[in-house]
Amino acid sequence: MTVRKIFIAGAGNVGSAAAAFMATKQLGNIHLYDILEDFAVGQAMDINQSLPYWRSDSKVTGCRSLGEMEGADVVVITAGGKRAEGMTRLDLLYQNLDIMYEIGEMVMTLAPDAFVHVTSNPVDVLTWALKERWPKMKVTGLGCALDAMRFRFFLAEHLNVSREAVNCTVIGTHDDNMIPLVNRADVGGTPVKEHLSPDDEDRLVTLVKHGGGDIVKRLKTRSGFFAAATKVTQIVESHLHNKQHIFPLSVLVNGEYGYSDMALSLPVSIGERGAHKVFEFDLSDEERILLDVCADSMRKVIAEIRERA
């Protein structure tokens, strides 16, 4: 059986946690890179020494160069500045854009067939930037997948039911414009709206939109990472095992909802070829207006990037 090579660019909290989670699930051998050379090596040593408990034969290697990406089946990009309290995801844009281009250049040179997954923020813009520069790159971004997981958690907590009983999604952009689709959510096959008052609905939507910010507020100097790393692991597993699971990921749109030349977070199936199929919903008038807001925001940022190029 071929052992897959997974390269993670960024050994910070998300990258290192994802490396550990992927290793415990034996998704492949993980190569963990960080600009702080010994840091990635130390993180890899720590993770490896935990793996006997999980009876995992995966190996985590700390890398001192992006060149060790060569031949990777999967490249996960977590590198970049992290959002501090009071900082928006868009504040990170110009800090992280150059990092994306440097890593993207290496991907297309050393691992052009790799499935690339971006978690760095602002994830929708960075996903678009990579795909726009390298159209043949198989790239998705974490997008609203993390927000959808938070939505599921908050709904289950409010309804006092198993989290497995809840199905829901979030679309749009991974920022304050995100759209938790309450109309599409169900619990045990029944519409969630039947169990929510208007006030409940408003409160839950607010919790989802501010879920990441609430964590940053309490952690002070760093962002949350366990949930993000868990979701990244699930996405990589769906790709490597061709599971065709559906996640609301950031993808380049090609006519969906009438949009193009931008990335939006929409439900997409992930399998061995990366993103297979984007799924569209019949949105309500209100939901469509909200999605237009996301698209308009993306257009403005993209126009600014092109003006500065």
Image: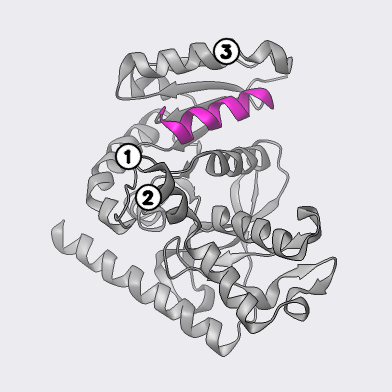
Marks 2 and 1, the one that precedes in the sequence? 1
From this view, report whether residue 214 is shown above or below residue 115: below
Tell me residue 241's x, y (percent): 71, 37
Instruction: Check disc 3 and report the residue beneath it.
Output: 48
- Residue 2 visible? The answer is yes
**What residue is shown at x 42% (from left), y 43% (from top)?**
223
From this view, report whether residue 26 is shown above or below residue 190: above
User: What type is the residue that disc 1 sits on?
Assistant: Gly
**What residue is shown at x 47% (from left), y 43% (from top)?**
224
Q: Residues within 10 Å of mark 2 (few under 14, many from 20)?
A: many
Q: Nearer the viewer, residue 163 or 296?
A: 163
Residue bounds of the magenta highlight: 11-26
Residue 4 placement: quadrant:
top right
Instruction: Check disc 2 and report the residue beneath it.
Output: 121
Per the image, label 3 sits on a secondary structure element best described as: helix
Q: Main secondary structure of the magenta part?
A: helix
Instruction: Check disc 1 and report the residue beneath it.
Output: 80
User: What residue occupies the far bottom of the structure in this picture?
Assistant: 285
Per the image, label 2 sits on a secondary structure element best described as: loop
**What residue is shown at x 57% (from left), y 72% (from top)?**
203
Per the image, label 1 sits on a secondary structure element best described as: loop
Residue 109 placement: quadrant:
top left
Q: Is residue 292 left or right of residue 231?
A: left
User: What type is the residue that disc 2 sits on?
Assistant: Asn
Marks 1 and 3, the one that precedes in the sequence? 3
Q: Are marks 3 and 2 in contact (CB under 8 Å)?
A: no
